[in-house]
């Protein structure tokens, strides 16, 4: 939900912080599974949070997939959140593990 634009958030039951359209476009360019239809969970979220003018459920599903595949856990002052660092997420890399930690 943190990747919706002000226009998409405006009609929601509960207000939250929105992002510029450009940020949303960048998030949609990140790696994600091919998605042709919204999941039941996303449909329930749309139904619960919007009484009128909801964003497209498929758009919300694609943004969710971008978060699932590209976010990092961040913990600060006892609060936890998921974050996407757009610049580093766009770098060419392999998601296959290629390093290991060894503690002695």
Image (cartoon, rainbow, N blue to C red):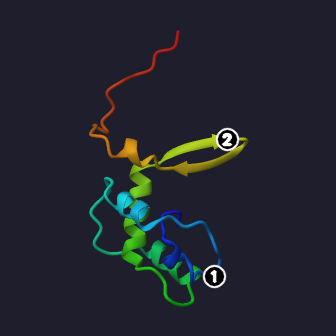
Residue at 47 percent of width and 49 percent of height:
84
Q: Residue furthest right?
A: 77
Within 10 Å of disc 1 (Cα), the crowding (few <14, some 14-19, many 20+) is: few
Q: Quadrant of residue 25?
A: bottom left
Residue 40, horizontal then vertical, whole percent: 44, 76
Question: Does 104 sit left or right of 14 as displayed?
Answer: left
Question: Does 50 sit left or right of 64 as displayed?
Answer: right
Who is closer to the viewer here, 75 or 19?
Answer: 19
Within 10 Å of disc 2 (Cα), the crowding (few <14, some 14-19, many 20+) is: few
Q: Residue 13: which numbered mark, if any? A: 1
User: Compared with residue 73, is residue 101 higher up or lower down, i.e. above or below?
Assistant: above
Who is closer to the viewer here, 4 or 74?
Answer: 4
State the SS at label 2: strand
Residue 96, horizontal then vertical, whole percent: 30, 36
User: Compared with residue 97, is residue 21 higher up or lower down, i.e. above or below?
Assistant: below
Residue 74, horizontal then vertical, whole percent: 58, 43
Q: Which residue is mark 2?
A: 76
Q: How far apart are the alpha carbons under marks 1 and 2?
A: 28 Å
Residue 54, horizontal then vertical, whole percent: 48, 83
Residue at 48 percent of width and 69 percent of height:
4
1 and 2 marks in contact (CB < 8 Å): no
């Amino acid at each position: 939900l943190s990747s919706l634009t002000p226009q998409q958030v405006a009609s929601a039951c509960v207000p939250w912080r929105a992002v510029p359209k450009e940020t949303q476009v960048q998030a949609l360019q990140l790696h994600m599974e091919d998605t042709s239809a919204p999941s039941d969970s996303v449909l329930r979220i749309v139904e619960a949070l919007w009484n009128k003018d909801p964003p497209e459920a498929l758009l919300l599903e694609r943004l969710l997939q971008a978060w699932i595949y590209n976010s990092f856990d961040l913990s600060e002052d006892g609060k936890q959140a998921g974050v996407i660092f757009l610049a580093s997420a766009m770098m060419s890399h392999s998601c296959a593990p290629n390093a290991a930690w060894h503690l002695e």
